[in-house]
Image: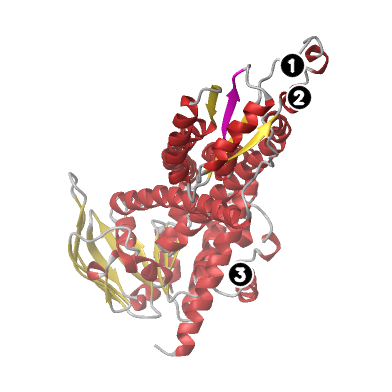
Amino acid sequence: MITFEHVSKRYPGAANALLDINFHLDAGEMVFLTGHSGAGKSTLLRLILLLEQATRGQVLVDGRNLSKTSPRLTPQVRQHIGMIFQDHKLLSDKTVFDNVSLPLIIAGMRYADIKKRVRAALDKVGLLSKEKSWPLTLSGGEQQRVGIARAIVGMPPILLADEPTGNLDPQLSRELFSLFQQLNEHGVTVMVASHDLSLIRAMGQRVLVLSGGRLIDDIPAAVSAAAVS
Amino acid sequence: MSIKSVRRRIRARTRRQLYSFFSSLGSLLGHRLGTLMTVLVLGIAMALPLGLYVTLHNLRDLDLKQDEWGTITVFLNDEVTEAGAVEFARKVNQRLDASAVMISPDQGMEEFRKVSGFGQALDLFEENPLPWTLLVTPQAADSEELGARVTVLAAWIEEQEAVDIVQVDHKWMRRLSGLIGLGDALVTVLSVMFSLAVVVVVANTIRLDVGNRAEEIQVLSLIGADDSFIRQPFLYTGFWYGLLGALLALVLLSVSIFYLNRPLEQLLNAYGKSFELDGLGGLRVVFVLLAGGALGLCGAWVSVERYLRQLRVGGLPGRS
């Protein structure tokens, strides 16, 4: 589903943010991306979301070579990816319902269907009762879950999350991770960038470890799971 | 691509248009004061050339009453008696290209008394100071020919012994039509300038609007909105601005016409003309509204396009 082949990313006037990254993610797989802050986790996600272009090498998402994708098709790529941001990126002048419905409106779905899908997504993250609330009246954890509802409402085949537990307490973080696991069990390819090592270890999933822009370890799920037990 | 999938895409596009349509209305109503001020500026900017246009349109209506303006007024010498006036009128009527109507001093006084409002003061004259007068109308097919005839005829009349003063309204009319021609050019110049102003005002307003909603645009772009989806609400907003501005301009114009109608009527009655000030007719109203909307659309397009280009070149801000 996601393949990196000798990918390097260099920002002008800075050291390599990513250097010769190689990995492959099958459809329906779940992977954690970890490393210290500045190790290149965010840059890697930004490459998948076409917020950046690789300086060298190629990124393939769902069989599409992103370095050869015309900018006109960027929206199409993004429509197939649900992205969860650390700072939620909710629109404060729209209600929770309106925020979550945006991807479906962009897709031009019928309002009746939008209503059903948004309710289902909000139900999934346990916020159905807050559909008429404004984002700023919600707690950080609730806002994060609204962001997740918006990411999954369009049922994208790929879900990316950038430090989703950044501001959450351990209890909420665990709940969030198990929500990702549930989604993964329904066939969604999930990639979560997080520096919360203890939590990642507890999940028993495949882990990619970045350090200084290099991929220094790729721990398969089996090994990871064995370590848990 | 199957017909079914084409149909589905058209339906999806329609729904997105509807969403943009309503969201643009919502954002206009959400900022009522700002919207009102912008529309006011646009309305005034559009009312000026429209007002001039309507004025010229009405003047041209006067212009069309050629035969009246083509008349030569001939005041005969004080010494000329009724018999002399009849003799002179016969002389004029003998020419093939003109006809004359006689006005006696008494008739002239009566008419002057009615129109001027000097009634009582005129009674102070012991005898009628007015001479015998002829209204000479040349025969002509069109205004070009009329102009030439009037000139020739006036010159001939001037040479006659019995004549004191020859007054040619046609000269006045030519000057008027010259002025109208100038006015036409002025309308064109003003229309172009004020259209440009409308585009700039809308462009600037939308630019601020885009700036205020930069965050929303970035989020939409992150979750897969394409340029057209981002562009649409702003284009609609620009269209509404232009349309509302044009509507306001028409209202201002109607109010002005209503206000000016009475004094103008009085003025023209003093010239012995009946007159009804003409506004803009149905089709022209539609045209003005559509043109306003189109100008607003242009302004919005300029601004949004510039912003989207910046967005593409500079990329989306965010952590790296």
Quick check: A104 above or below B6? above
Measure the C-alpha gap from mark 2 to mark 1: 7 Å
Residue to which mark 1 is pinned = B128
Q: Are marks 2 and 1 in contact (CB under 8 Å)?
A: yes
Disc number lying in front (3 or 2):
2
- Look at 60% across and 50% down and name the residue there: B27
Measure the C-alpha gap from mark 3 to mark 1: 96 Å
Q: Nearer the viewer, residue B268 or B252?
A: B268
Quick check: B196 above or below B79? below
Residue to which mark 2 is pinned = B106
Span highlighted in magenta in the image: B71-77
Horizontal side of B82 relative to A144 (left or right) equals right
Q: Nearer the viewer, residue A142 or A149?
A: A149
Co-location on one chain, circles 2 and 1: yes
Helix, strand or loop for disc 3? helix
Residue to which mark 3 is pinned = A118
- Crowdedness of circle 3 by 10 Å Cα count: few (<14), some, many (20+)? many
**Quarter occupied by residue B46:** top right
- Crowdedness of circle 2 by 10 Å Cα count: few (<14), some, many (20+)? some
Image x and y of residue A19, in percent: 18, 59
Quick check: B126 above or below A178? above
Image x and y of residue A47, in percent: 29, 62
Q: Chain of mark 2?
A: B
Residue type (three-letter) at the residue carrying disc 3: Val
**Residue B44 seen by the camera:** no
Image quadrant occupied by the N terminus of chain B: bottom left
